[in-house]
Image (tube, helix red, strand yellow):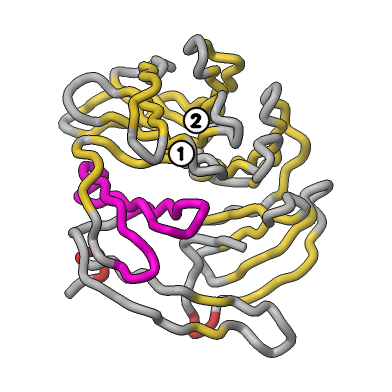
Amino acid sequence: MRWRERLALAFCLLIAGSGVYAQLRTVWQRPAISFSEKMFPLPDGSGVFFTGHHGWVSYLLPLPDGRLLRQVFYGEEVASITPDGHWLLTIKKWGTERRFRIWQLPDFTLYREIDIPDIGGESQYVTSVHLTPDGTHILAAMYGCDWYYYTCYPEVYAIMLIRIADNQIVWSRSQPEGLNLLVLSPDGQLALVENDYEVQLWRVADGTMQYELDISVDCATFSPDGQLFALGRWDGTITLHQTSDGTLVRTMRVPNDRYAIQLHF
């Protein structure tokens, strides 16, 4: 069975010590829905949301036993969850209307729907999106594209902060290059933004860039206290940086010539 046709969840520990790369132990593994993509664990560790079928079907899987609990959304992609586990953000993809939808957990009560803003082009697509930890704002990276012979070619890129209470855009910043990565800090004050050429640290409140690093990466994450962030590259390199100024703290390698596709402290 090809890797795209199964979901393998494992509880693993990565030790970044001298001469020790990783200690991995698979607790369980199960075949799942085709093309399983993103995973969002509940903060209390009781389960994990994941989306399959090219982002069309979303499920909630309980932990630690791994029984398939239920299908929770159809035509919607799970996109973000607040650290307290009270709010869930999905992207409605069914039909012509593409919307952000905010749900209250654990009973999945629909709180608000927000139309995805039009930034230009014939169609709008969200590449990455986050709820702020207090559940009051949406930080989204998007692109607008035009269709030519069944292919939508990106024409414009933007990052924006949307206030949920009144559906208003607090700020929007156009970008000259493709937006490949958007990662929010644990306190919601900072964000890592990556395009085709560099990684930038932004202040979320007003969308200003604090500094940039001349590096292209595939994944990133902040430490729980927000003092550090890690960057993962296609060649298996993981670098650890100080959030305050981007200073390189440590360089590590993924074992067995693998590459990093997701990072978590």
Q: CA distance from mark 1 to mark 2?
A: 6 Å
Q: Quadrant of residue 249?
A: bottom right
Q: Nearer the viewer, residue 149 or 124?
A: 124
The answer to whether residue 31 is visible is yes
Label 2: few (<14), some (14–19) or many (≥20) C-alpha neighbours in 10 Å? some
* Number of numbered discs visible in the structure rendering: 2
Percent of width and height locating residue 256: 49, 85
Q: Residue at x 45, y 52 (%)?
A: 42
The answer to whether residue 159 is visible is no
Q: Magenta stretch containing residue 39, yes or no?
A: yes
Q: Amino acid at mark 2?
A: Ala
Q: Nearer the viewer, residue 190 or 26?
A: 26
Percent of width and height locating residue 12: 50, 76
Q: Is residue 216 above or below residue 237?
A: above
Give the magenta range: 37-66
Percent of width and height locating residue 146: 29, 23
Q: Magenta stretch containing residue 34, yes or no?
A: no
Left or right of 171: which side holds 34? left
Q: Is residue 48 above or below residue 56?
A: below
Q: Is residue 110 above or below residue 38?
A: above
Q: Amino acid at mark 1?
A: Ser
Find disc 2 in the rendering and name its residue. 140
Q: Are marks 1 and 2 in contact (CB under 8 Å)?
A: yes
Q: Residue at x 73, y 43 (%)?
A: 212
Percent of width and height locating residue 157: 48, 27
Find disc 1 in the rendering and name its residue. 128
Left or right of 184: which side holds 214? right
